[in-house]
Image (spheres, grey):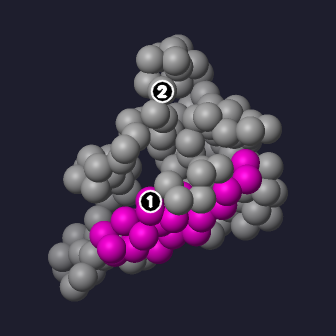
Amino acid sequence: MAGGGRNRYRIFVVDDDEAVAGMIGQMLRRMGYSSVVCNKPLDALTLFSRAHERFDAVIVDEMMPDLKGTQLTTQLLRVKDDIPIILMTGHGNMISLEQVRGSGVRATLIKPVLKERLRTVLDGLLPLPSAGR
């Protein structure tokens, strides 16, 4: 089966850079996941608040207008406290470990995001179904 069962997972991607968000969404689809992309953090918060049950994980960029990724993470977790959230950043040295831990982020990705790293992170957060199911 293409995607090895990953297609049952829907990943919400939030990045104000449309090209990056589109690339991550496409990468996820090629790996067998379903993806929804949003380029505005406040719109993402609204969508997530209205339909959080549709998502199994969220990937957020740290540096966005209106809300930083860590701030958005805190808000998303108020809606659904067990959603795995992955923080992407191109500025790894500008965000403290305490900030990341305090926000509830479960994993981080450094831009440019590599497909194998993304797969490894998601496989660690979203267990694949066993072969007999």
- Total labels: the figure holds 2
Q: Which residue is mark 1?
A: 24
Name the one closer to the observer, 96 or 130: 96
Query: Dot 1, crowdedness within 10 Å: few (<14), some or many (≥20)?
Result: many
Magenta segment range? 21-41
Q: Helix or strand or loop: what does disc 2 sit on?
A: loop
Residue at x-position 40% and y-position 73%? 29
Real-space Cα distance between discs 2 and 1? 18 Å
Q: Residue at x 38, y 36 (%)?
A: 110
Q: Are marks 2 and 1 in contact (CB under 8 Å)?
A: no
Estimate the x, y position of residue 49 in percent, counting from the top left.
Answer: 78, 57
Q: Nearer the viewer, residue 15 or 122?
A: 15
Tag 2: residue type? Answer: His
In this view of the protein, can residue 94 be seen by the observer? yes
Residue, x 29% and y 65% (percent of image)?
A: 128
Please indicate whether residue 31 sits to the left or right of residue 56 in the image: left
Neighbor class of circle 2 (other Cα within 10 Å; few <14, some 14-19, many 20+) is: few
- Residue 31 in magenta? yes
Q: Is residue 81 above or below residue 27?
A: above
The three-letter code of the residue at mark 1 reads Ile
| 100 displayed left or right of 53 | left
- For label 2, the residue is 91
Residue reaching furthest left? 131
Say which quarter of the image contains residue 36.
bottom right
Task: Reply above or below: 18 against 42.
Answer: below
Which label belongs to residue 122? Answer: none
Indicate the position of residue 79 as horizontal and vertical percent values: 73, 49
Q: Residue at x 76, y 62 (%)?
A: 47
Helix, strand or loop at label 1? It is helix
Q: Is residue 75 left or right of residue 86?
A: right
